Image (tube, rainbow, N blue to C red):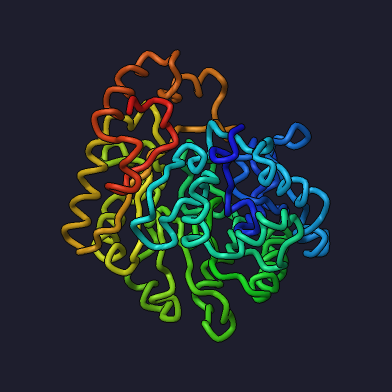
Amino acid sequence: MNHENKLYCSIAMGGWAEIGHTGEPSKSPNVNGDVYPCCPGWLKDDTNPAGYDFGNIYKDKWEDVWNGERAQEFRKSILDGSFKYCNENLCPHLQNVHSKPNVGSIESAPVVRKMKDIELLYEERGEQHRDIIEKQLTELSLAPDVVKMDYDRSCNLSCPSCREDLITPRGKEFELIEKIQNSVIKVIQEGTRKLYITGTGDPFGSATLRKFLLNFKKKDFPSVKTIRLHTNGVKWTKEIWNKMTDLHGLVTDAEVSIDAATKETYVKVRRGGDWDQLMENLKFIPSEVPWFGMSMVVQDTNYKEIPQLIKLRDKLVKESGNKSIYVYFSKITNWGTFTDEEYEKKAVWKESHPNYSDLVRILNENVKKSYWQDRFMGTNMTDLLRD
């Protein structure tokens, strides 16, 4: 590989610790405290179908997890450019590598750069990466830059693309989640800059995470400068937001997974959701969060609404005055909630699907690879884009 075209990922090199995501299928425990260097679905490991993990925060000492043998082996695969534990077919960062300077905040800056553009990454993601590359460091600071709090799958929805039933931990499982959270808080207080809550459930639908947000005090977490909320948005009401005063100005990054642009489709793909309440909440949320987005898990049921979701984004930009509102389209993945036959019917992005050509047409009419930087539109289906 030409050195100039060799890739480097800032997330993988101390930038991220995802805690508690057990991966799928759904027979996996709801929570166990496993630690991953990014989204498990973007990772691959022949010994673990859930993805490449570093260890377990509940069972092991943090220093043995964060700088243990598996962690250092993973970082070597980034430094040597092999990315052998990464799934480039699903990772949106590996699919959206470009040479353009970032036009937004650090939250929108590319996390993967080619070595020929590495000075841009140092400027956007921090000078610590210069030291890591030049010294080929695999043992890093004990405090991850970002902690993703994924140890509770509780959610007020039971979307068919994600789970078969509502998940509400009780008894010993709830106690375990609370214990893991206490361990995570200690890690955060070592110097973490950003919190990501959450990629496995809902921050407002989870009793544990909701309590954390309601009780959050800046003085207890002086290193935390920003928080990202990933939510279905239904329970993010004005009433509860007004009770989370210490989060105001600190939540600078949020995404609402909406999966539809009409009420008719929404009730099918977001089981248990409330379209009217969500639309009411979207009247104020974008004006509270500088970097805000909406996402769609693209499937046979909703792919025709890609243009309408873009129009909804444009409407929110106009009404809120927030020009940094993105929309993201991702291919549906089988998290063990579908049979193989059911999944084939859902996976419209597959060439074998009868509506594949229609999806490709709609996608290309509305999204281009350059749009992530130019118009804040992205997808992990870049292989379907013609430009």
How many discs mark residues in the rendered view? Answer: 0
Q: Reply above or below: 130 against 5.
A: below
Q: Is residue 56 left or right of residue 386?
A: right
Quarter of the rendering occupied by the C terminus: top left
User: Is residue 80 left or right of 338 when viewed as pictured?
Assistant: right
Q: 189 or 167, which lies in front?
A: 189
Residue 230 spot, x, y in % from top left: 46, 56
Q: Picture coordinates of residue 144 (x, y %)? A: 64, 64
Snapshot quadrant of residue 287: bottom left
Image point (37%, 57%), residue name: 234
Residue for point 21% across, 57% down: 317
> 156 or 340, which lies in front?
340
**From the viewer's perspective, is residue 198 above or below residue 41?**
below
On the image, the x and y values in percent for residue 162 come to 52, 40
- 20 and 87: which is toward the camera: 87
- Say if residue 317 shows up in the picture: yes
Is residue 204 visible to us here?
no
Find the residue positioned furthest to the bottom. Answer: 219
Quarter of the figure with the N terminus: top right
Considering only vertical position in the picture, is 235 above or below 381? below
Q: Nearer the viewer, residue 73 or 275?
A: 73
Q: Is residue 194 left or right of residue 84?
A: left
Q: Position of residue 346 (x, y in %)?
A: 44, 25
Q: Which residue is painted at 44% across and 59% down in the image?
A: 107
Q: Residue at x 47, y 60 (%)?
A: 124
